[in-house]
Each structure stands twice: as C-alpha cells, then as structure tokens.
Amino acid sequence: MGFLLAIPAAILAFFARLGIIRSGALLAGLAFSGVLLISLFVGVTNNLSNPTPPTAEEEFHQHPKPLALASDGPFGKFDQQQLQRGFQVYKEVCAACHSLKLVAFRDLHALGYEEAEVKAIANQWTTEVPSINPETGEPATRKATPADYFPSPYANETAARAANNNALPPDLSLITKARHGGAAYVYSLLTGYQKQPAALLKEFPTAKTPANLHYNPYFANLNLAMPPPLTSTGQVTYAPGNPAPTVGQMAKDVAAFLVWTAEPKLANRHHWGVMAVIFLLFATVLAYLAYQEIWAAAKRKVRPAGPLNPKNKAKTRRAKAKAGIAG
C-alpha cells in the first residue's frame, strides 16, 4: 500500500521539478480571473442597457418633515409641559395598541408629576398588570403600582396580531432610536396619512393600496395597517394654558414624549457633555501655558551612546593603534 501511495507522490514531484504544476496553477488562476472580469463586464453592461425599473416605493416614498424640539442640539433640554401633553396623547390614543415595556410608572416623576399623581396614573391605567392569584395559583391581573412597567395592551403577540389584521404594533419605548429620522419620522407618520395620489396609480397601476391598509408616503412601503390615530382637532383635551390640540400639535407632543422614553437622561448627558468640553479646553490652555513657562526654553540634551560615546571612541582608537591599523 505504501508503495502504491508513493507512486503519485513521485510523479507530482517529477512534474514539480519541471515547473508544470506551477505553470498550471498560474494558468488556472488567470483563467478564473478572466471569467470574473467577463462576468463583471457582462453584468455592468446589462445593468446599463436594461436598468432595473423604479418601484412605487422608490418614487413616492418621502423623507420625514423637519421638526424642531426643545431637546435638539447639544444644549437641548426637555420641555416638561410638552412631555406631559405627549404622555396624555399616548395614554388616550396610542396606549390602546402600543406598549411602553421599558418605561416604569415611577419614571413619570421626571415629567414633573407628583408622587400622588403617579400613583393615581398607575392605579387608573386601563390595562392591568399580569399577576398570579396567591390563593389558587391561577393567572390573574391587578392594578398597577408606580414600581410596575407600563403593561402591554395585549396578552401576547398572537393576540396583538389577531386584533390588528395580523400586523404587530411595535413597542414605542425606543421607537425614535429605532427609526431613521427619530422624532421627525414619528411626527411625519402621524400627520402624513392621505389619499393615494393619482400619479402613483397612473405610473404603477398594480400599486393600489390593499384593503385594510392605509396610504402614508412616510412609511417604508407606503401602506401600513395602522389607521390614522390622530384625526381631528380636540381629539385630546389639553389643560388650560396649553396650545390648541390640533393634529400637528398632538403629533409633535407625542413625538417629543417618545424622544424622552428613548433617552430619559438626554438633558443630563447634554449638561455633562458641555462640562467635559469646557474642562478639556481649560486643561489644554493650562498645559500650553505650563509648557511655555517650564519647557519652551529648555534645550534638549542628547546623551551619545554606542559608537558615538567618547569612551567607546577612545577604546576604538587604542584597539586600532595596537593592531597597527591607520585611522
């Protein structure tokens, strides 16, 4: 068996000496590269001569509208009144379908609510918190407390899809972080519902909005299952002294509230970020002045080492003289 295995090895070694295997590998590599180049050329040519036709989403999808909030920019701070209005819109409109599973009732203290108000909000929340009956061990529900997180309006994903034409309402805790455009996307989506344009149907006859879906150019595929949640002025009643609750104002307020749910420490981060920049600028100026005072006039001293060391040079000269070498 060993003799039989040695024969192919000897043949390969023989051809390797002749350079045949190396030449063959080079030719194979060149052929493979040539095939790749030809495929690339054919693909580019086909794409230029027969470009992919545009889709309705590419032609009619719109970027979010500009939206200015008090929390924008490095010096931005939350407007507590606006956050309270946004929470009211969420409670009365959005909470019927969307959860806030990463936000606890006690977090509402940051919006300016007192302890008693937070307890009342939790106790009066429409959806109760899932629990266990301590006497029977059976599943049950109970009133929420400030320590609880906002409960989901549905028992599970299956129940949520069954109630929304198989669409799953997303959790809104981080929605302004999860969507391109952030708060501007939320605002644009809530105010962007409209009839499907005639130009769209003329250019794309098969792109008609299906039944139970709603056209919105700010949504990725133009059609979404959520019906317009904000439909008329006064849908939510604001307390006296607040702006009129128009659709645009309510959308802006709830967008600001969802910015807070996604990053409740935003104002604190802005504060310490500015303080850090001021400290670094002060430290930079202080370091420069210290350099000018202490080190700017000091000359750099280079200690000779190796062959340049005077002691080593003397040893070299003595060794050359002893050996009778000139220089």
Image: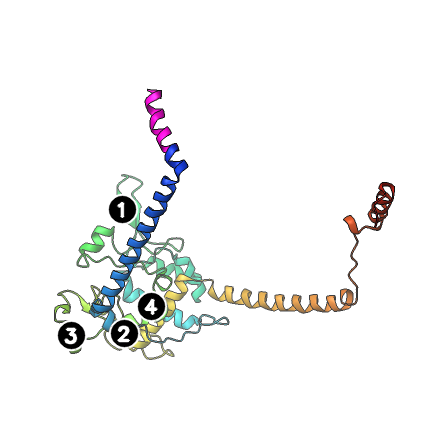
> Which segment did they paint magenta?
1-13
Mark 1 → mark 2, Cα distance in angstroms: 38 Å
- Which SS type dominates the magenta stretch? helix
Residue that numbered label 3 is attached to: 203
Q: Closer to the camera, 148 or 102?
A: 102
Marks 4,1: beta carbons within 8 A = no
Q: Is residue 205 above or below residue 12?
A: below
Marks 2,4: beta carbons within 8 A = no
Residue that numbered label 1 is attached to: 140
Dot 3 or dot 4: first in sequence order is 4
Residue that numbered label 4 is attached to: 88
Kind of residue at disc 4: Gln
Mark 3 → mark 4, Cα distance in angstroms: 42 Å
Crowdedness near tag 3: few (<14), some (14–19) or many (≥20) residues, C-alpha within 10 Å: few
- Residue 63 position, x and y percent, is 31, 72
Residue that numbered label 2 is attached to: 191
- The residue shown at (27%, 76%) is 234
Kind of residue at disc 1: Ala
Q: Is residue 319 above or below residue 184?
A: above
Mark 4 → mark 1, Cα distance in angstroms: 27 Å
Mark 2 → mark 4, Cα distance in angstroms: 18 Å
- Residue 219 position, x and y percent, is 26, 67
Q: Closer to the camera, 27 or 92?
A: 27
